[in-house]
Amino acid sequence: MAEDGWQVEGTLMIACNCDYGCPSNVNGRPTTGKCEGGWTWHIESGHYGDTSLDGLNFSIYADWPGAIHEGGGKAVAFVDERADDAQREAIRTLARGEVGGPWAIFINTFDLDGPHPVPYEIEVDGERSSYRIGSAAELQMAPITNPVTGAEVHPRLVLPEGLLTRELGLFRSEKFRVDGEAGGVRYDHTGRYAALGAFANSGP
């Protein structure tokens, strides 16, 4: 456990195979009956004990045969290659749920491979946010458009009891693909659900 506790906050980027909005956000079943998607945490400010995590990124991509809470999934994690040994170990500890946070819940739903160090190119820009994680994953967000008029719409979701975030901007994925060769997690769900929100987690 971190000697002086841990804290991370920043921007969470989400994408999966569900229709826009993702029913899992409101305790519904995944659109297709199973869940294939993941999260990227861009840490704007954070520490693990006396190890700074400012500006680093990490991701988890999973493939569950049903709803997340039903478990049985496989997943792969990636960590920013700029992290030094102490930072990498801190993020590994968080991602594997060893000191609490939402990861302590998710680790019970999948077998996790990694984290593997990869280069991150990430841009936090609202509905146009994007990232490229080496050759492992890519996401480009775009606004949802009205199917009749073509006009952009800008829905938001408020989650007072949210596990990962308390409010999300809801978008579509102009591009979303994962090729997590190391963990055997691969899919392309371009044109499906994407979202962006602030996160803040901490522990003793």
Image: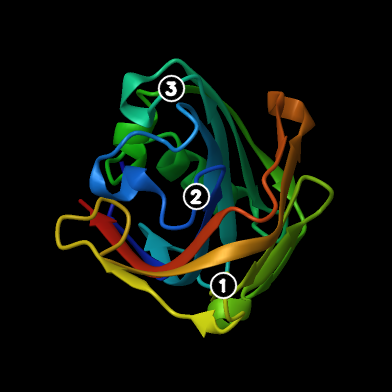
Kind of residue indicated by mark 1 = Gly
> Which residue is found at the position 77% from the left and 45% from the top?
136
- Do tag 3 and tag 2 residues touch (Cβ < 8 Å)? no
- Residue 21: % across, % down: 41, 57
| Disc ID at residue 55 | 1
Tag 3, which secondary structure? loop
Q: Nearer the viewer, residue 163 or 94?
A: 163
Using the numbered discs, state the Cα–Cα distance from disc 1 to disc 2 in whole angstroms. 31 Å
Tag 1, which secondary structure? loop
Q: Earlier in the sequence, mark 1 or mark 3?
A: 1
- Residue 153: % across, % down: 47, 80
Kind of residue indicated by mark 3 = Gly
Q: Earlier in the sequence, mark 1 or mark 2?
A: 2
Q: Residue furthest front?
A: 148
Using the numbered discs, state the Cα–Cα distance from disc 1 to disc 3 in whole angstroms. 34 Å
| Count of marks, rendered view | 3
Residue 178 figure quarter: top right
Tell me the mark number nearer the camera, choosing from 1 and 3. Answer: 3
Residue hosting label 2: 19
> Which residue is found at the position 28% from the left and 46% from the top?
101
Kind of residue indicated by mark 2 = Asp
Residue hosting label 3: 66
